[in-house]
Image (cartoon, grey):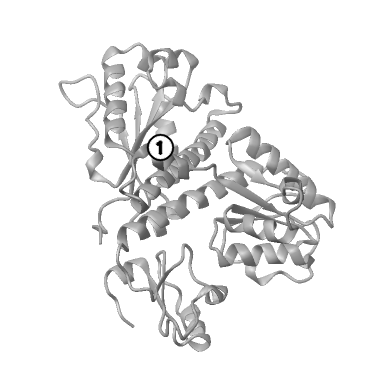
Amino acid sequence: MTDPTRPLLVVYVAWHPGFAEGAWIAEALRKHFRRELYENVAGGTGLSVLFRSVSPSGTNVPLPIDLNEAETTAVVVLADPHTANDDEWLRYIHALAEQTEAAGLGARVFPVAIEQSALLALDIAEQALRWDYWDGSTEERQQQLVGELAYEFSRMLRHYLEHLKRPAEDENALEGYLRKVQVFLSHSKHDNDGEKIACAIRERLQAGHGLSSFFDVHDIPAGLRFNKVLLQQVRVSAMVAIHTDSYSSREWCRQEVIEAKRWNVPFVVANSLSQIDERGFPYMGNVPIVRLDPNGVDRIDVVIRRLLDEVLKDFLWRCRVELATREVDTSIIFVPRPPELITLASLPPAEAVPSPIIVYPDPPLSAEEERLFAEIAPRVQLRSLTEWLAGALR
């Protein structure tokens, strides 16, 4: 079992001290990734976000970065003309790029091009996120950067996760296991809003993040059974459920939600009710819910960013479980979100596993939730990850 106190992912943000906006951008990243959202899967106060800008006494560049302090390390470089015109800073960034390249799958540099001129001096320019191409205010660009980095961190962690599962394979072989994150848009065609919102989200995904989306019948190959392919796609995708007025009344929408819950995929509900939902579907809880006005659809980016957060949390959780559970009893069942009654549907039969233990991200469930589980499934024990690692008993 790995050291549970060792951080899984540490994020460094580096910027030239002459770039005044660098501190504001870095603080926006720190606030996002170090907040409560990531506490349950990253531990402590969320992901560690450290700054590299101010130079220590006697030098013109920041302190070096120790890649051995965490399982994985992401270095975000805010590249502006001050960076490009400072030879010592360029050498510092180039050294970081070589250092992360030598470290393998668990470390990467993510350059952010604040201005195009900054790219000309960087050897890693082809990897840059293009802040200079984005529209909107500084705050709006900061939010887009948060989403782009959540996606890029997810890709890095997926690569690292494959390495943990297949340590004997080299990096080139592992590339064959990587695919884009797929997004399944679950919606009802029985009101105008569902189709309209799904089309708008699909267009934004394809234009903005490079995420491939799956949009029911249009992407199902000819000759394959609709229901079989549809449910299989739900199992391997992150899902957005577009909750319009008719959503809960549609059999396929309900089945997609149940399938997503049974397979523990990253899941966000876009609350787009216009009037009323006569019978709210009970299995749409226990996941983030984002308000998305069906007549405005001006919060699509908020939905996408929240989904990207859930994707990143999913990879963080899976990496933590893989590191902590190289040899564990088959009675241990790991789930990426707090368990609910539908979780019981995925448990092995009692004949195979008489006393399963469900391990889930911190914090522990409330007392009333645990009492309900105890009444319905007395053979099942519940532990948060911290409780399980500490060997807590009940």
Q: Which residue lies furthest to the left in this view?
A: 58
Can residue 190 be seen? yes
Give how far across and how far down residue 383 sits, in percent. Answer: 38, 73
Q: Quadrant of the image for the N terminus?
A: bottom left
Give how far across and how far down residue 50 sits, in percent. Answer: 31, 39
Dot 1 surroundings within 10 Å: few (below 14), some, or many (20 or more)? some
Give how far across and how far down residue 361 sits, in percent. Answer: 41, 64
Label 1, secondary structure: give it: helix
63 shown above or below 313: above
Q: What residue type is labelled 1?
A: Glu
357 shown above or below 46: below
Corner quadrant of residue 93: top left
Corner quadrant of residue 103: top left
Rendered residue at 69%/43% (across/down): 201
Give how far across and how far down residue 362 sits, in percent. Answer: 40, 65
Q: Indicate left or right for 83 with 288 as reference.
A: left
Rendered residue at 54%/31% (across/down): 141
Corner quadrant of residue 175: top left
Rendered residue at 48%/64% (across/down): 337
Q: Nearer the viewer, residue 60 or 319?
A: 319
176 shown above or below 350: above
Q: Indicate left or right for 213 with 334 as reference.
A: right
Q: Which of 111 and 141 is in front in this view?
A: 111
Rendered residue at 57%/74% (across/down): 342
Q: Quadrant of the image for the C terminus?
A: bottom left
- The number of discs equals 1
Residue on which the image places disc 1: 27
Can residue 43 be seen? no
